[in-house]
Image (cartoon, rainbow, N blue to C red):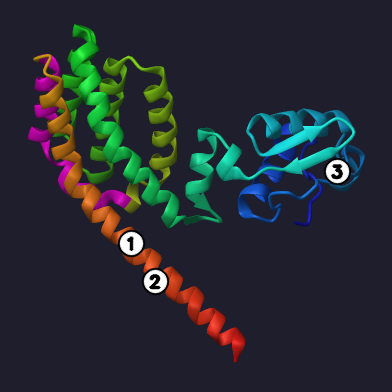
Amino acid sequence: MPFEPIKHRSVPEDVYEQIVDGVLSGDLPAGQNLPSERELARVLGVSRPAIREAMKRVAAAGLVTIRQGGGTTVQDVRRFGGLDLLPRLLFRGGELDVSVARSVVEARAHIGPKVAELAAQRANDTQIAAARSAAQKLADTAEPVAQQVAALDFWDAVVDGADSITFRLLYNTMRAAYEPALSAFAVALADEVGNADGYRAIVEAIADRDPAAATQAAATLLAPATSILMSAFGDMETLLRKGESDAEDTDDI
């Protein structure tokens, strides 16, 4: 990967972004040793303290390992990366990564019913009221992208009711990854976000303290769009593999 001088300001954030982009794009592959702190400072045109601070952040993200006297080595993102990388992995080079999008939809299909189940067990009256209000707002919304935002707010309230820090952080990350793609998913999710009765069924099951009913209501709501999206992603991956195969065949000629 050709490192580029920091043009506007010599700050750790700029250095961090450039290294993370290199690791996620594969330009800096797992196992590769990064240049020394002194060399990076020279190439990027920044101070060594800025490099040092940026490297601490990159290491904290699980992207590199720093060994005293042994240099800095790029780590395998899939083995050591954290959830905070998900939004960056979903869109790379301005394009949707189909395999990452598929994994987000798979996780959504499993997490939704579980947080609904937990909310039926743990949500307080205020949280139930917030979920009911969000469901009503969704029912009153007609514009497709606005409906998706309202649906996200609904699930935000349900996650609050689940009272699980792990599911909260998972949801935060998934929402951050998903929000830039709202318009891309508008057609596939139109029936789901337009299903006001489906959202109300989840709220009422939570209010009735019925975990099984809440789980089923959430699964029923999410299943149709999950099926549509998974089928679409499968078709897209097939086309991508075919394109790669055709390109290899062309190279062999």
Report the Cα–Cα distance between label 3 and label 2.
40 Å
Label 3 vs label 1, nearer the camera: 1
Provide the residue designation for mark 2.
239
SS at mark 1 in the image: helix
Q: Quadrant of the N terminus?
A: bottom right
Task: Give residue 82's position: percent from left, percent from top.
Answer: 55, 34
Q: Residue at x 41, y 29 (%)?
A: 170
Residue 98 shown left or right of residue 34 in the figure: left
Q: Amino acid at mark 3?
A: Leu
Provide the residue designation for mark 1.
234
Crowding near the residue tagged with mark 2, few <14, some 14–19, many ≥20 C-alpha atoms within 10 Å: few
Q: Residue at x 20, y 41 (%)?
A: 222
Mark 3 near mark 2, Cβ–Cβ under 8 Å? no
Boundaries of the magenta span: 185-207
Label 3 vs label 2, nearer the camera: 2
Q: 82 or 136, which lies in front?
A: 82
- Residue 23 seen anywhere in this rendered image of the structure: yes
SS at mark 3 in the image: helix
Q: Residue at x 32, y 66 (%)?
A: 235
What type of secondary structure mainly makes up the magenta span? helix
In the rendered image, the residue lying farthest to the top is: 125
The magenta stretch spans residue 187: yes
Q: Amino acid at mark 1?
A: Gly
Task: Give residue 61's position: percent from left, percent from top.
Answer: 63, 33
Q: Residue at x 20, y 20 (%)?
A: 131
Sequence-wise, the earlier of marks 3 and 1 is 3
The magenta stretch spans residue 34: no
Q: Amino acid at mark 2?
A: Leu
Mark 2 near mark 1, Cβ–Cβ under 8 Å? no
Provide the residue designation for mark 3.
40
